[in-house]
Image (cartoon, coloured by chain):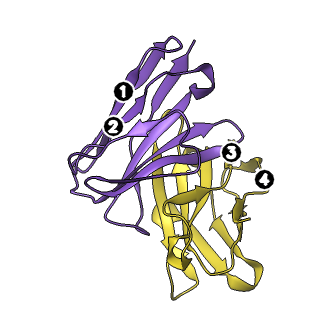
Chain colours: A yellow, B purple
């Protein structure tokens, strides 16, 4: 079955340290890939997306993600986190490009905690 | 300002009392969808609409209805709400399929 896995439910990082959030998908073709961030009490905001081309994509707020076809992964990274990065992060795929259902399929999210 | 507006933001109601959550977008987007967010489950799609008068089921459509009579509006209807529909609901819109979606701020529903 098609799925999106975020293996880390919670991650704690010290302010100023680097960050990597993992995302793996299970799908035959290459889907469209997204990372969204959700701050407490708010909706989801798009951080970045991958459709095709360069496998390293830059997003807002200093985030980047790298698509690795061989590993079916789309991990999110940031070289130095700030306290304001504390939030819930969701990886999502759109499978419709390969004939799958329309709409986004989300991972279950990773809760990022920033230690002072 | 480009936005997706949901109303109400919070609602506590009782089992069986019909309710509607409205969603409106001002970006002339063709694609709109509804999701519910539950702890440990992430977001799951309820219904989506590719354009006016075109709607289709998502992953968890049972107990919900939608309509798309105008391009900007996509209301979510719970004809006979039940406690298992207590959740946080998000409406989203995009220029088209495969495009990044813009999300509303969410509606927290509690069904007693």
**Mark with earlier residue (4, 3):** 4
- Farthest-out residue, right: A7
Which of discs 4 and 2 lies nearer the camera? The answer is 2
For residue A18, side relative to residue B101 (left or right): right
Where is residue A69 shown, x and y percent of the image? 69, 84
Where is residue A18 shown, x and y percent of the image? 70, 62
Q: Is residue B29 above or below residue B13?
A: below
Which of discs 3 and 2 lies nearer the camera? The answer is 2
Asked if residue B15 shows in the view, the reply is yes
Marks 3/2: CA distance?
30 Å
**Residue, x 21% and y 49% (percent of image)?**
B26
Marks 4/3: CA distance?
8 Å
Q: Residues within 10 Å of mark 2 (few under 14, many from 20)?
A: many
**Residue, x 53% and y 42% (percent of image)?**
B61
Marks 2/1: CA distance?
7 Å
* Occupied quadrant, residue A113: top right
Chain on which label 3 sits: A
The one nearer the camera, A79 or A96, is A96
For residue A44, side relative to residue A55 (left or right): left
Q: Is residue A99 above or below residue A18?
A: below
For residue A39, side relative to residue B72 (left or right): right
Say which residue label 1 marks.
B20
Element marked by disc 1: strand
Element marked by disc 4: loop
Marks 1/3: CA distance?
31 Å
Which label belongs to residue A8?
A: 4
Number of marks in the rendered image: 4
Q: Is residue A30 above or below residue A79?
A: below
């Amino acid at each position: 079955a098609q799925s999106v896995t975020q293996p880390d439910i919670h991650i704690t990082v010290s302010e100023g340290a680097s960050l990597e959030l993992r995302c793996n998908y299970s799908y035959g073709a290459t889907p469209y890939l997204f990372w969204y961030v959700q701050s407490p009490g708010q909706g989801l905001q798009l951080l970045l997306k991958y459709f095709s081309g360069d496998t390293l994509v830059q997003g807002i707020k200093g985030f980047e993600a790298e698509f690795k076809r061989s590993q079916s992964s789309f991990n999110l990274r940031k070289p130095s986190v700030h306290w304001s990065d504390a939030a819930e992060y969701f990886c999502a795929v759109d499978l419709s490009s390969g004939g799958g259902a329309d709409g986004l399929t989300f991972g279950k999210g990773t809760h990022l905690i920033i230690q002072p | 300002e480009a936005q997706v507006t949901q109303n109400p933001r919070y609602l506590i109601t009782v089992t069986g009392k019909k309710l509607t959550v409205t969603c409106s977008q001002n970006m002339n987007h063709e694609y709109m969808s509804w999701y519910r967010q539950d702890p440990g489950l992430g977001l799951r799609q309820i219904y989506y609409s590719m354009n006016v008068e075109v709607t289709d089921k998502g992953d968890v459509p049972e107990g919900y209805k939608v309509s798309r009579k105008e391009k900007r509006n996509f209301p979510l209807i719970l004809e006979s709400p039940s406690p298992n529909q207590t959740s946080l609901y998000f409406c989203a819109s995009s220029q088209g399929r495969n495009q990044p979606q813009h999300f509303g701020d969410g509606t927290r529903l509690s069904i007693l």
